[in-house]
Amino acid sequence: FCFWGRLSTCNNQLLSRLSGCVCRHYENRYGLEICFRNIDGGLLLLHPFNITVNSRAILGHNVTLFKGCTVGSVRSGKREGVPVIGNRVTLCVNSTVVGNVKIGDDVLVTANSMVDFDVPNHSVVIGNPGKIYYKENASKDYLTGI
C-alpha cells in the first residue's frame, strides 16, 4: 500500500492514476485513509486496518502506525488544525493524535492513548488523558531497517 501510495503522488499522470486505483482498492479492503503528500519516507504500517491520517497532517521520517490509530484535525478552539509528527515516532494500537500539536522526535504513543497536546522529544505518552514520561530511545524497539 505504501509503495502504491507514494507512486500516486508522482508527476506522471498515467502512473499516478493507475497507482491511485490500486490504492483505493487497499483503502476499501482494509479501511485505510492515508494521503501520502505530507509523509516523509519510511512509513511503516503494522497490522494495517482502520488507520486514518488527515490529508493535511505532516509525518516525519520512519513513522510507525499500528491498527486503529488516528491522526486527525480539530475544527475549532485553541487546538484548531492538524498534527505535525516528528521522526522516529510510533503510534500504537488505537492511539489518537488530534489538533494543532507538535509531536517531537523519538516518541512512543502507547495503545489507547489520546494526545491533544505537544509532546517533547524522547518521550512516551501513556493513557487517556495522556501523561508524558521521558525515555531515551523511546521508539527504538518499533523501528525496523534503521
Image (cartoon, rainbow, N blue to C red):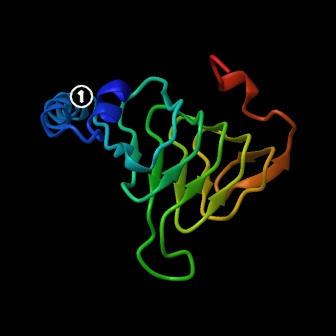
Question: Which residue is depicted at the point 47% across and 44% down?
Answer: 39
Residue 115, by quadrant, is bottom right
Question: Which residue is depicted at the point 58% across and 44% down?
Answer: 60
User: Residue 77 placed where, x, y %?
Assistant: 51, 82
Q: Is residue 20 above or below residue 72?
A: above
Mark 1 Cα shell of 10 Å, populated few (<14), some (14-19), many (≥20): some
Residue furthest bottom as drawn? 77
Judging depth in this view, the residue of 121 and 47 nearest the camera is 121
70 sits left or right of 55 in the view: right
- The kind of residue on which mark 1 rests is Tyr
Judging depth in this view, the residue of 65 and 9 nearest the camera is 9
Q: Where does the C terminus fall, quadrant-wise?
A: top right
User: Residue 42 placed where, x, y %?
Assistant: 54, 30
User: Residue 3 placed where, x, y %?
Assistant: 35, 25
| Total labels drawn | 1
55 sits left or right of 130 in the view: left
Q: Is residue 54 above or below residue 19?
A: below
Q: Is residue 129 above or below residue 28?
A: below
- Give SS at disc 1: helix
Q: Which residue is mark 1?
A: 26
Q: Is residue 53 above or below residue 23?
A: below
Residue furthest front as drawn? 12
User: Residue 141 placed where, x, y %?
Assistant: 72, 22
121 sits left or right of 11 in the view: right
Judging depth in this view, the residue of 89 and 49 nearest the camera is 89
Question: Which residue is depicted at the point 51% across and 34% down?
Answer: 41
Residue 89, by quadrant, is top right
17 sits left or right of 67 in the view: left
Q: Where does the N terminus fall, quadrant-wise?
A: top left
Residue 138, by quadrant, is top right
